[in-house]
Amino acid sequence: TKEQKLLEDSLQCINDKEFAIEKVFLALRTSGGVKEFSKYSNILVANWKTLLEQYQEAGLLIYEDDRLQLTDEGLDVYNSIVSELLEL
């Protein structure tokens, strides 16, 4: 049908890497954060562990038991943190 064709044309297919990036983007904005964060290492910059330590020391995030959560201060600079962590 014409409606179905319009819907199909408007849907965007994304690959696995793009899906993982979107999942991290969205989860970081929630109070639960990102569970099993290290499984996303394939989309992170090489020095992601060092960056997490620096951000944690600065009070911008909490990283424990492989869960990453931004603090209120971290949410204020969300874009900077994400752009430095993710391999875009």
Image (spheres, rainbow, N blue to C red):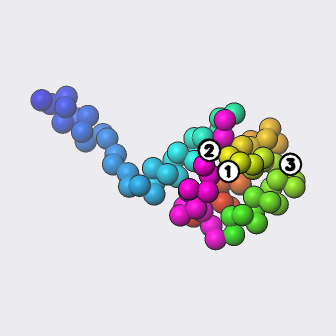
| Residue occupying image coordinates x 30% and y 39% | 10
Tag count in the figure?
A: 3
Q: Which mark is residue 59?
A: 3
Residue 24 lies, in percent from the top left, at 57, 47
Mark 3 vs 1, N-terminal side: 3
Q: Which residues are magenta?
A: 32-46
Residue 32 lies, in percent from the top left, at 66, 35
Residue located beneath label 1 in the image: 66
Quadrant into which the N terminus falls = top left
| Residue occupying image coordinates x 56% and y 56% | 39
Which residue extends farthest front?
65
Asked if the residues shown at circle 2 and circle 3 are in contact, with their CB atoms under 8 angstroms apart, the answer is no
CA–CA distance in space, label 2 to label 1: 6 Å
Residue 25 lies, in percent from the top left, at 58, 46
The amino acid on which the numbered mark 2 sits, given as a three-letter code, is Lys
The amino acid on which the numbered mark 1 sits, given as a three-letter code, is Asp
Asked if the residues shown at circle 2 and circle 1 are in contact, with their CB atoms under 8 angstroms apart, the answer is yes
CA–CA distance in space, label 3 to label 1: 17 Å
The amino acid on which the numbered mark 3 sits, given as a three-letter code, is Gly
- The answer to which of 28 and 77 lies nearer the viewer is 28
User: Relative to 60, is 53 above or below?
Assistant: below
Residue located beneath label 2 in the image: 35
